[in-house]
Image (spheres, rainbow, N blue to C red):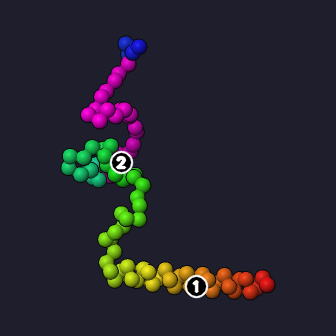
Amino acid sequence: MIGKNSTHRYTQRFLATKNIAISEEAYQRLKALKKPGESFTEVIERMTRTRGVLDLAGVLSISQTKEVSERIRESRAESARRLHRTVEKLS
């Protein structure tokens, strides 16, 4: 039974309505991220969804990808050398 002071709002997606307090600066940032026709809910969902590695496809150029790959290989090799030196010291 609904009390006489209860307020209910319904949206097209049948979402619960929640009021949150944010600073004016945070509101302006959120508003700036909004695309035409997008709701604040959609902005928040878009910005907070879990991203997979495939979301990165096409972000780097081929040359950037090669450079990053080379730096990763170098970093791994240096880590392996440090680990080897540490094991030798402990032996």
Residue at 42% from the left image edge and 80% from the top image edge: 68
Q: Determine contact: label 2, label 1, CB under 8 Å.
A: no
Q: Is residue 13 left or right of residue 19?
A: left
Q: Residue 25: tell me if it is visible.
A: no
Main structural element of the magenta stretch: helix, strand or loop? loop
The verdict on residue 24 being magenta is yes
| Residue denoted by label 2 | 44
Q: Where is residue 38 in the image (x, y as percent from the top left)?
A: 24, 46
Q: What stretch is highlighted in magenta?
A: 6-30
Q: Tell me which corner region of the image, top left, top right, bottom left or bottom right, holds residue 77.
A: bottom right
| Residue denoted by label 1 | 78
Q: Tell me which corner region of the image, top left, top right, bottom left or bottom right, holds residue 2.
A: top left
Q: Position of residue 22 (x, y in %)?
A: 39, 43
Report helix, strand or loop for mark 2. Answer: helix
Residue at 37% from the left image edge and 79% from the top image edge: 65
Specify which label sits upstream in the sequence, 2 or 1: 2
The verdict on residue 8 being magenta is yes
Q: How many marks?
A: 2
